[in-house]
Image (spheres, rainbow, N blue to C red):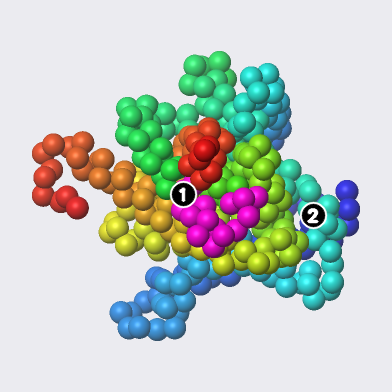
Amino acid sequence: MNQPKVNQPQSIDSSRLLGGFGVIFLFILLGQGVSRFFRLPVSGSVIGMVLLALALGSGILPLTLVEDASKLLLQHLSLFFVPAGVGLLAYGALLKGNWIPIALAIVGGTMVTQLATAGIHLFLLRNGRLTDHTEEG
Amino acid sequence: MGNLIFLTGTLLVYALAQAVQSALGKGLYAPGGKVSLRKFLGTISVLFHPVLVSVLVIMLILSLTHTPYEEYAKGTEGITFLLAPSVVALGVPLYREWKRLKAEMGRILVTVTFGSLVGIFSSVLPALFWGSPSEVIFSLAPRSVTTPIAMNIALATGGIPSLTASVVVATGIFGAVAGPVVLAILGKVEGSAFGLAMGVASHGIGTARALEIGMGEGAYAALGLCLNGVLTSILVPGILPLCLFPPR
């Protein structure tokens, strides 16, 4: 096949991509280890995320090694939730009888939480800046 | 490994849903100032979140074909498996924004603590007033945090982990779709306030949505998800039983 060579995007280096995945899986293992050792209620992958940020921040791990792999994963993060979302179908029976408070929690609770979180943060941002008294409330 | 048709189907449905959303989204930039159907569809394209559309379409297909969910879940294990490395990968935007985040850490901690408490109590109060059994109440309490953490909390407090898992995902999808619209009530919400709200209230799916807006928003959301996961792990088993069922 003699197709003319198209300019490949430079950032994709397949061996670095594989290495990056290896490093990310290593941090899941590390996170799981820490979680078990200290009997933390936080899952291994969340601890792995913090450990990865720390390793990058301290310079132990070069960013170039995990950059591509993390980009690839994060670009399609939403997709990975699809099977779990379909799982709602399986628990229909569990929801029965309590579906009103559950729906209220999901819809109302989520909106209230989003508004409260953004609201207090905006409030703190405004009140942190002492020069800005005009836009409160 | 299961049947390959489920994995293939999920990928195709998702790709299609993504294409539909971006096609609708283009209507936003339709020429002319007139109100047109294209413009309207562009405005509501945010509601056609690929996760929401894919989940609904796949649910419909599974129920029409009388396929048990277990079979589908087994076939799509490969997709679900990638959740854990994706959470770890959030360490990269976290590191990238670290200098900015560190300077704001005091403020972020206050925000996330408040958001975490509102998240917990807004989850349990409706069920409490409804008179739901305590296992339902404790299944709902960790609703705002990412699935593996939430399931751990439910297990530790006497909730039903599988119920928690489905409520968590529903919360994430709803939060990701409604978030930008709901937050517009407060005016122009962007940057840190937007990212934290998405991460604290709707965990990974909200964080994915924040990442679509920008790397900075994504980093704040990842931090919100992480801190809220830790706080909720402490607050729900620690104080919720005392608040709801005080010792006599």
**Residue indicated by mark 1:** B121
Which element is circle 1 on?
helix
Q: Residue at x 57, y 67 (%)?
A: A100
Amino acid under label 2? Ala
Magenta stretch? Answer: B119-137
In the displayed orientation, state which residue is furthest to the front: B248
Q: Nearer the viewer, mark 2 or mark 1?
A: 1
Amino acid under label 1? Phe
Do marks 2 and 1 share a chain?
yes
Q: Position of residue B107 (x, y in %)?
A: 32, 34
Q: Position of residue B225 (x, y in %)?
A: 51, 40
Magenta stretch: dominant secondary structure: helix
Reply above or below: A63 against B189.
Answer: above
**Residue indicated by mark 2:** B73
Mark 2 neighbour density, 10 Å: few (under 14) some (14–19) many (20 or more): many
Q: Is residue A76 magenta-colored?
A: no
Q: Is residue A108 visible?
A: yes
Q: Is residue B169 visible?
A: no
- Nearest to the observer: residue B176 or residue B46: B176
Disc 2 sits on a residue from what chain?
A: B
Q: Position of residue B41 (x, y in %)?
A: 47, 76
Instruction: Answer left or right for B72 relative to A78.
Output: right
